[in-house]
Image: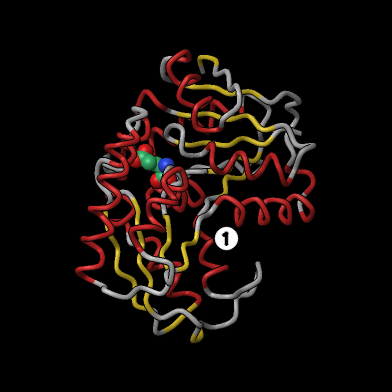
Amino acid sequence: MAVGIFDSGLGGLTVLSALEKRLPDVPFVYLGDSAHAPYGVRDADDIFALTCASVERLWAEGCDLVILACNTASAAALRRMQETWLPKDKRVLGVFVPLIEALTERQWGDNSPPREVRVRNVALFATPATVSSRAFQRELAFRAIGVDVEAQACGGVVDAIEDGDQILAEALVRSHVDALKRKMPHPQAAILGCTHYPMMEQTFQDALGPDVEVYSQASLVAASLEDYLQRRPAMRGSGTAARFLTTGDPRRVSDHATRFLRRQITFERA
Ligand code: DGL
């Protein structure tokens, strides 16, 4: 009954830890494509091809359901995968929709027409590929009207996090928040639209100030997966063991992951 979790690198671990807390009986197989990270500077075809290859690897682990714990893959590849590539007995879900449902005060499956919501000014921090896909604005427009979104492409942050360079990552976050505030001085809400960014959540919150509500995805995705598995129990695949797989150097990736999650994580070669 294993479920696959995919990210371009380490960012999806923020989602994985929330999933492990919420669903302790489900074995999760995590695959980080660190050899090809960051995805955020790649084009959509490239992201599609890399994401499909990783999802196939997770099928081989007995995971019929794979969560793309990566906004860049969710934004640039998920729709095309679902429409053109996915076999009928497999499912791939992204991380965007649970977040947008929370922001627009909707329950899962509420397909009523878009309506006015509490938040009016939203800052979106994401990778360059996610920002240029405009997937966030598209999903939001299905559900809400009158919301002004200002997006900031946060170049360099994922690289710094993957390299374990905390000082550089903090400096970059502060300068991206400054750039966003020049375009939108008073956002009410900020979306951390990249699964790496919760590792920098405090820096985002400090730079944005206490009045800005910071939405981060991990717990929203966990609640949504729990709900999904209750409705679709057959999507728990045949795999039985939790594993951590990487296309990068397992020792290096294990060291960084152990530091991020503050517990021993041992990656194997994918
Ligand atoms: N953590 C991923 C995301 O949520 C990908 C970052 C990247 O590889 O650029 O967007």
Residue under the point 42% across and 55% down: 192
Mark 1, secondary structure of its residue: helix
Judge whether 132 appears above or below 266 on screen: below
> Mark 1 sits on what residue?
98
Q: Where is the N terminus found, in terms of image quarters?
A: top right
In what quadrant does ligand 1 lie? top left
Residue under the point 31% across and 44% down: 170
Kind of residue sitting beneath label 1: Pro
Q: Position of residue 15 (x, y in %)?
A: 57, 44
Q: Position of residue 251 (x, y in %)?
A: 47, 13
Q: How is the image coloured?
A: secondary structure
Residue under the point 38% across and 65% down: 209
Judge whether 34 appears above or below 135 on screen: above
Q: Position of residue 58 (x, y in %)?
A: 58, 29
Judge whether 163 appears above or below 123 on screen: above
Q: Position of residue 252 (x, y in %)?
A: 43, 16
Left-right relation of 157 to 190:
left
Task: Looking at the picture, tell me which residue is in the foreground, 72 or 265.
Answer: 265
Task: Looking at the picture, tell me which residue is in the foreground, 237 or 71.
Answer: 71
Judge whether 267 appears above or below 19 on screen: above
